[in-house]
Image: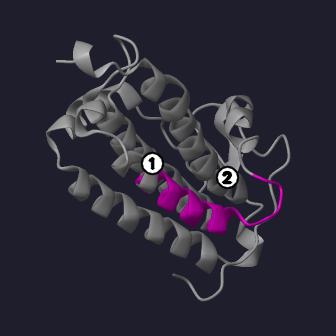
Amino acid sequence: MFQKLRTIPKPLEGEFPPYAIMYMKLIPDDGLVLQHLWDNFVAAKELIYSLPEKMLYHRYAEDKWSIKETLVHIVDDERIFAYRALRFARNEQNNLIGFDQDSYAIYSQANERDLDDIFEEYELVRKSTIALFNGLPEDSFMRIGKGTGTANNASVRALAYHIAGHEQHHINLIKDKYIPSFEPGLQD
């Protein structure tokens, strides 16, 4: 895909909001986060296409997203965090506001979309994210940007790991909660 992917050392505590430790722990400490982003996309695509179509609309609990909604959420989150990384890398000094992930999921209308269409967008966003981080100046990775409140500040490199770990978190949920709870005979 890319001729050469740079290594990006894993961020240290203090470079990301406390909640993001759950994502950081899911990515190896080998500096190969960009390769992990691509490999995890390929693995996620293989997993999802192996599932019966009916399962793509399944929710493991009443207030949870469907698998299609989860996929579009991963893409939305990646776009937002890559944009934050770009702003922080360019030394933006204005605070960035958060986003309402539940509202995004509702208005995405993901369940009405074709799976091929979702994965086409997912792949293009992923390639764009990798290209962004691969092309940033070396000195930009340690810049800390401001989120809403100091508890949401993050370094540029932490945002690369956030994107990768966030995706892995949701793929793990699909494996651990969605697939085991799917009962084809009981689904609409």
In the displayed structure, would residue 79 be above or below residue 32? above
| Residue that carries the numbered disc 1 in the rendered image | 47
Q: Position of residue 25 (x, y in %)?
A: 76, 40
Residue at coordinates 54% horizontally, 60% vertically from top-left? 87
Residue nearest the observer in this picture, 40 or 104 = 40
Numbered-mark total: 2
**In which quadrant of the rendered view does residue 13 lie?**
top right
Q: In this view, does 14 lie to the left or right of 5?
A: right
- Magenta-span inclusion, residue 39: yes
* Mark found first going from the N terminus, 2 or 1: 1
**What kind of residue is marked 1?**
Leu
Density class for disc 1 (Cα within 10 Å; few <14, some 14-19, many ≥20) is: few
Q: Where is residue 46 in the image (x, y as percent from the top left)?
A: 43, 55
Q: Position of residue 77 (x, y in %)?
A: 45, 45
Residue at coordinates 32% horizontally, 28% vertically from top-left? 66
Q: In which quarter of the image is the C terminus?
A: top left
Q: In this view, does 18 lie to the left or right of 34?
A: right
| Residue that carries the numbered disc 2 in the rendered image | 161
Disc 1, SS: helix
Residue nearest the observer in this picture, 91 or 123 = 123
Residue at the extreme front of the image, as rendered? 185
In the displayed structure, would residue 170 be above or below residue 160? above
Residue at coordinates 71% horizontally, 69% vertically from top-left? 140
Please identify the dominant SS of the magenta region.
helix
Density class for disc 2 (Cα within 10 Å; few <14, some 14-19, many ≥20) is: many
Disc 2, SS: helix
Q: Position of residue 179 (x, y in %)?
A: 44, 28
Residue at the extreme bottom of the image, as rendered? 3
Q: Give the range drawn in magenta.
A: 28-45
Residue at coordinates 29% horizontally, 63% vertically from top-left? 120
Q: Is residue 95 visible?
A: no
**What kind of residue is marked 2?**
Tyr
